[in-house]
Amino acid sequence: MPDFQWQGITVSAWIFRIARNHVIDYYRKNSKRKKDKSLSDVANYVESKAPNVEIELQADEEEAALYIAIQELNEDEQYLVYYKFFESLSNKEISKLTGLTETNIGTKLHRIRKKLSNIINKNNDTR
């Protein structure tokens, strides 16, 4: 700190810059030089790691269909779906929030799953 000369930046920015430079130095010093790869090897590697666009599109369509189906549920059913699958609450925790029994919640969620499946199948048939 005695050698510090203010140059228009804060002390915290100065310390952060020092830490950043140490990290860069560490990785430069400890990185092992890998053998040169051909362009085709790199292309094959990238291709193997690239996500399959068709699979991602299908997953997006399925997710959209599920959200549309959830909108067709009544408000109480939507809350149960939200608590169970978006908040990852147990039936016991949902029971405390809703005043329903754990068994009743399990039954309702089972019926809701069937209802969602029917809604999604119906919507797919109309396409």
Image: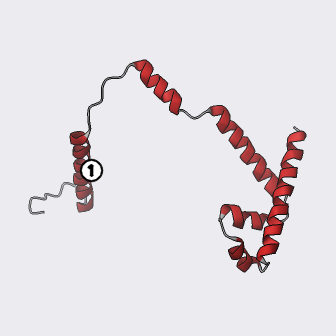
Position in image of residue 56 (x %, y %): 65, 38
Q: In x, y percent, where is residue 4?
A: 13, 59
Left of 55 or right of it: where is 2?
A: left
Give the farthest residue toward the front. 103
Q: Residue furthest left?
A: 2
User: Does 11 appear above or below 38?
Assistant: below
Residue type indicated by callout 1: Arg
Q: Quadrant of residue 71?
A: bottom right
SS type, badge 1: helix
Q: Is residue 33 above or below residue 86?
A: above
Residue at left 86%, top 45%? 121
Asked if residue 9 can be seen in this view, the reply is no
| Residue 54: x %, y % from top left | 67, 32
The residue identified by callout 1 is: 20
Instruction: Identify which residue is drawn at 89% across, 40% down.
Output: 125
Residue 84 position (above or below residue 68): below
Which image quadrant: the N terminus?
Answer: bottom left
Is residue 85 in sight in this rendering? yes
- Quarter occupied by residue 109: bottom right
Residue plotted at (76% across, 75% down): 102
Q: Nearer the viewer, residue 9 or 2?
A: 2
For the C terminus, give its image quadrant.
Answer: top right
Location of residue 4 with respect to 50 vertically, above or below: below
* Left/right of residue 25 with respect to residue 64 in the rendered view: left
Examine the image and state in which quarter residue 97 appears.
bottom right
Going by the image, does 39 lie left or right of 29? Answer: right
Left or right of 32? Residue 99 is: right
